[in-house]
Amino acid sequence: MPVSVARSLVIIATVAGTIFFTRLCPFLFFPPGKPIPPVIQYLGKVLPPAVIGMLVIYCLKAVSITSYPYGLPEFISVAVVILLHVWKRNNLLSIGVGTVLYMVLVQAVF
């Protein structure tokens, strides 16, 4: 059953309002000229690596190393991402090349 136009507009307005509010929050809570609290600075330093670590674990949790292809596409791609990132220090490049490599390995090689 298709969604009505009115319901679609309500959904779009709700999503747009929510995104606008979440983008506005930092400016409301931390106005210019006022120092950022130390706890927020700490979280800004430790959360990004923690989130990346959780994403890696989440992505690799279902990899079976006991059956074909033994997790080779995943581990080859992860190794390329790590090596490329250490070499170039470019997040977009590392993740993009790793994703394309993984897709090629899964679709054409394994």
Image (tube, rainbow, N blue to C red):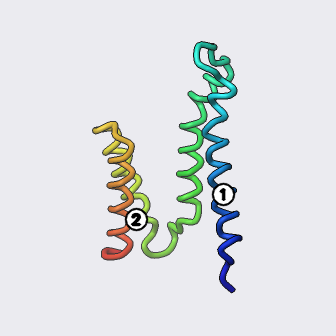
Q: Quadrant of residue 36?
A: top right
Q: Which residue is mark 1?
A: 13
Q: Can you say whether 88 is above or below 79 in the image? A: above
Whether residue 94 sits left or right of residue 17 in the image: it is left
Write the residue at 34% across / 62% down.
100
Which structural element holds mark 1?
helix
Report the residue at 67% width, 42% height from top: 21
Q: Is residue 102 left or right of residue 28?
A: left
Q: Separation of disc 2 and disc 1 at Cα?
A: 44 Å
Callout 2, which amino acid?
A: Leu
In the displayed structure, 55 sits above or below 88; it is below
Query: Looking at the figure, which quarter contains the N terminus?
Result: bottom right
Query: As rendered, which of 30 and 54 lies closer to the eye?
Result: 30
Q: Which mark sits nearer the N-terminus, 2 or 1?
A: 1
Q: Position of residue 67 (x, y in %)?
A: 49, 74
> Front-most of 84 and 69?
84
